[in-house]
Image: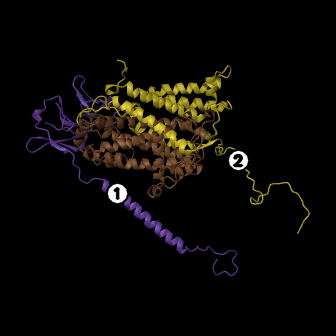
Amino acid sequence: MATTAWTHERLEQLRQTRVWRSIFRRGPARTNRTRSLAVFGNLALHVMPVKVREKSLSVRATYYLGSISFFLFVVLTVTGILLMFYYHPAVPDAYRDMKDLIYVVSNGVFLRNLHRLAAQAMVVAVFWHMFHVFYRGGYKPPHEFNWVIGVGLLLVTLFLSYTGYLLPWDQLAFWAITVGTNIISYVPVLGRPIRFLLLGGHIIGQNALLRFYVLHCVILPLAAVGLIAWHFWRIQKDGGLTVRDDHE
Amino acid sequence: MPGEPNAPGKPEEKTPVSRRDFLNEIAGGALAIAGIGAAVVTVNYSSPNVLFEPPTTFRAGSPDDFPVNSVTYLQDQQVYIVRTDKGMWALSAVCTHLGCITQWKPESDQIACPCHGSKFQRAGNVEAGPAPRPLPHFSLVLGEDGALVVDKLEVVKETEILKV
Amino acid sequence: MSEKNTYEVGISSDALKQPRRVVFITRNTSAKVKEETGPQLMSFPHVILRETIAFQILTIVLVGLALFWDAPLEQLANPLLTPNPAKAPWYFLGLQELLHYFPPLVAGVLLPTLVVLGLVVIPYFDVNIEGEPLWAHRSPRRLQIYIGVFAVLFVFLALYDAWTVLVPTAVVGALGLVPYFHTTNTSRFQKFLGSRPLPWWVMTWFIAVALTLTVVGTFFRGPGWSWVWPWS
């Protein structure tokens, strides 16, 4: 007991120092004003509303599917960045690096498993989230455009998963991407040029691997972050989450 | 009408463009040109001019290497060399449906694709499955030294057979 | 100046003098969802706390699974040898099954584009906002259109032998007719079906077809995309 009191006192002293108060302006969030500031005055959190309706917080209201999709994206980003330390997007290094990650690198197999698992889970989560939002009418005005942003996010998720699929450079990856890019060439007029740009050539080789890597690690994540921020912002601006009446 | 003193209505006057609108239009046009230009430059940049891909013209040995009434699969080039009593031709081994590599099945006298079950005759025609087009024939000529030369970039009609 | 007070009954159009909000809703237009009231909570700490807990639970589940479920790695990519069967990632297997029946332009380009466009425009159609049950008026004309659409679909699908799409379409189509024909002694399930609006039926049909296609593509297709029983 005495130690806790001592620790509390020291913490309070720390909080009164000039240095601390220059970084953390608002003070502990114990009043509604400071609780508001905890969200409103926070760089990351102010995309969220300061207050929410209580019934939107129950699990059955949303099953937290949107949040889960976002958290999976965070897990994928962290594991993905770590995997980048050992992966060379080149032929034949890529496959060797996969073996390296699985058999040699400490916790490599775990990180790789986590990354792939989170990727599959994210595809499931975003589909389930979309269907759940539909069935509870969360697309109705004034939330229409947020639904459109959501469809954009679905496409980005699928494309992220697809570009990542090629990176191990094994038979599974190579032929899945062969079929997919050949489907693209069936798009009238633009199909072949798009395929050429995507692959950086006519065949799935060195250029294709590098382009898919850049898409997977830079272009698509940036697009995803932008759309996610916009998606959260629109929830706040359009009036908060939609909850079905029978789920109160 | 101009010139008539008691004309009932004024002739159409062109409203002059204000300086603001004119400058806005010029600026907008310049931005549009810059934007389109940037896009075109990016697409050109992304379109490689030099490709490091396997050569598409290759030598396939002499005609004697291929017995009459045979279908030989050249794995490195993904090409079948087919020889009948009428002559020889080179067939692409890439399925015309979605790009999988086909396999020659001598027991059923068919070229079969493992992906969606397309089946082709040795002349390339589709016998079964979702393939939309027959397997293309590549140009097959006899070089000066008597070696067969295949050019995968030149597609020829299936009636063009190399007589040996 | 004092005037004798005369009272007039009416609603002033001067919003400053008589601030009164009157909403005119024209028939057959969409109205905004009514502002929901109810108790509110501060995001900090209530939302932040719940989200943190959700994240922790998710992490625990993911880590637990990742420790035991190994991601696959097949042999080095070989451009000269196509594995048999060559399957796309599972979320595209439904598409690949569709490719088995329809030409690549249809199954690979047209249908996915139509699906995406269909999704995007959902919130801009009034029928999706009003939420009126499909058979609210038991209109015979609507029944004709319903049966007509399904007849055309069946013919089209049968023509292409696309029975993987036909079966779920038939099931959902039949379920959709239940509330029209069966009106006495309705069970809870029938009452539920009877209250479903058109967009519900369309989305349920879409999910049924997509699920069937994906399951068939994953478990029931083997070498050469031939039919296999998963337990054999």
Residue A215 % position (x, y) = 35, 47
Q: Is B45 located above or below residue C110 in the figure?
A: below
Read off the residue under disc 1: B42
Q: Position of residue C127 (x, y in %)?
A: 61, 39
Q: Is residue B72 left or right of residue A101?
A: left
Residue at the front extreme, as displayed: A2
In which chain is the residue bearing label 2? Answer: C
Q: Is residue A167 above or below residue C196?
A: below
Position of A47 compared to C90: left or right?
Answer: right
Graded by Cα atoms within 10 Å as few (under 14), some (14 to 19) or many (20 or more), the crowding at tag 1 reads: few
Q: Colour of chain A?
A: brown
Across and down, in percent, residue B120 comes to 28, 30
The image quarter containing residue B127 is: top left
Q: Which chain is purple?
A: B
The kind of residue tagged 1 is Thr
Disc 2, SS: loop
Closer to the camera in the image, B76 or C11: C11
- The disc label shown at residue C26, or none: 2
**Amino acid type at mark 2:** Thr
Q: Is residue B155 visible?
A: yes
Farthest-out residue, left: B145
Tell me the quadrant of the picture where the C terminus of chain A can be found: top right
Q: Is residue C183 left or right of residue A87?
A: right
The span from disc 1 to disc 2 (Cα, nearest Å) is 50 Å
Observer-nearest of C115 and A23? A23
Locate residue B64: give its quadrant.
top left
Chain under numbered label 1:
B
| Label 1 close to label 2 by CB (< 8 Å) | no
Q: Identify whether A228 is placed above or below C137.
A: below
* Residue C99 is at least partly visible in this image: no
* Chain ID, yellow in image: C
Q: Are marks 1 and 2 on the same chain?
A: no
